[in-house]
Amino acid sequence: MNPSYFKDKVIIVTGASSGIGLASARLFGSFGAKVVMAARHYEQLLSLAPSVGDAAHVLCVKTDVSSEDDCRRLIDSTIERFGRIDVLVNNAGISMRAMFKDLDLKVIKSLMDVNFWGTVYCTKYALPYLLESKGSLVGVISIAGYSALPARTGYSASKYAVRGFLDTVRIEHLYDGLHVLVFAPGYTDSNVRKAALTADGSAQGATPLKEDKLMSAEECAKHLAKAIYKRRRQAILTPIGKATVWMQKRFPALLDKLTYWYVGREAGSPFHKD
């Protein structure tokens, strides 16, 4: 990968206040890109911006991606400041952990509003500019967007939906020079599991995984940048992620059993059996 590829490119990153989003913003900034950081927590974005780049190259926009107006404002602010868009990274997302039978349906609605509709809204308003620049449209999904993850019905459903949406946009603009990337990290060290919603919609507050054993957000960001540079249609990370997608295509019934066993081993699993 040639870092100079990103120099002076205008890159929007949603969910840029932590995890993969923040690591990606910092990496793009180090490559000389003009980075637009979008997240709900504006003051936090402002405090983090110096770690991404100087004031002339970084724009912070308070954005709740579940709000169509906020997403429109994000794109308008970017064009007003930088005049173009080269890359849109739809990274903002939330997770959940509860059995569907126990779930308040507002939880699934919240996940669809953020994960799916947030991607749709941002893409809708950025698309004319991405077509003009022949740029990159990116959706950060999950292996759960390829193979269902129990106790994460809303999460898997939203990530499947994002993948279907982006794959369709790719075909619609197959000959327009638009690059569409579906980016699927495996388990990555981030805050997403602590903030995951439980059955009643409250935050989980703790992670069931050993975060220090997972891929770092910084390493994930490097894979993302490489996939954008190479204009790949999809990127599936981690050995277990690649094995899961491979098995889903060839041995789906066996994968169901292995997934049940694997997720059932998590601390406090909703369907754990001794």
Image: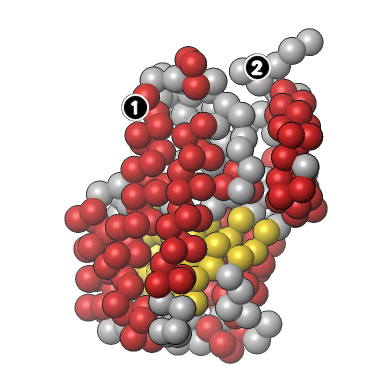
| Residue 124 tag number | none
Residue occupying the far top of the picture: 274
Q: Residues within 10 Å of mark 1 (few under 14, many from 20)?
A: few
- The image's colouring method is secondary structure
Quadrant occupied by the C terminus:
top right
Give residue 85's quadrant in the image.
bottom left
Quadrant occupied by the N terminus:
bottom right
What's the distance in space between the residues labelled 2 and 1, CA to CA?
21 Å
**In this orientation, which residue lies closer to the viewer: 57 or 230?**
230
Give residue 122's quadrant in the image.
bottom left
Residue that carries the numbered disc 1 in the rendered image:
106
Residue at the (70%, 57%) spot, across then down: 237
Residue 205 visible in the displayed image: no
Residue that carries the numbered disc 2 in the rendered image:
271
Residue at the (34%, 50%) spot, across then down: 117
**In this orientation, which residue lies closer to the viewer: 42 or 266?**
266
Amino acid type, label 1: Lys
Amino acid type, label 2: Phe
Q: Are marks 2 and 1 in contact (CB under 8 Å)?
A: no
Residue at the (40%, 64%) spot, across then down: 37
- In the picture shown, does residue 117 fall above or below 152? below
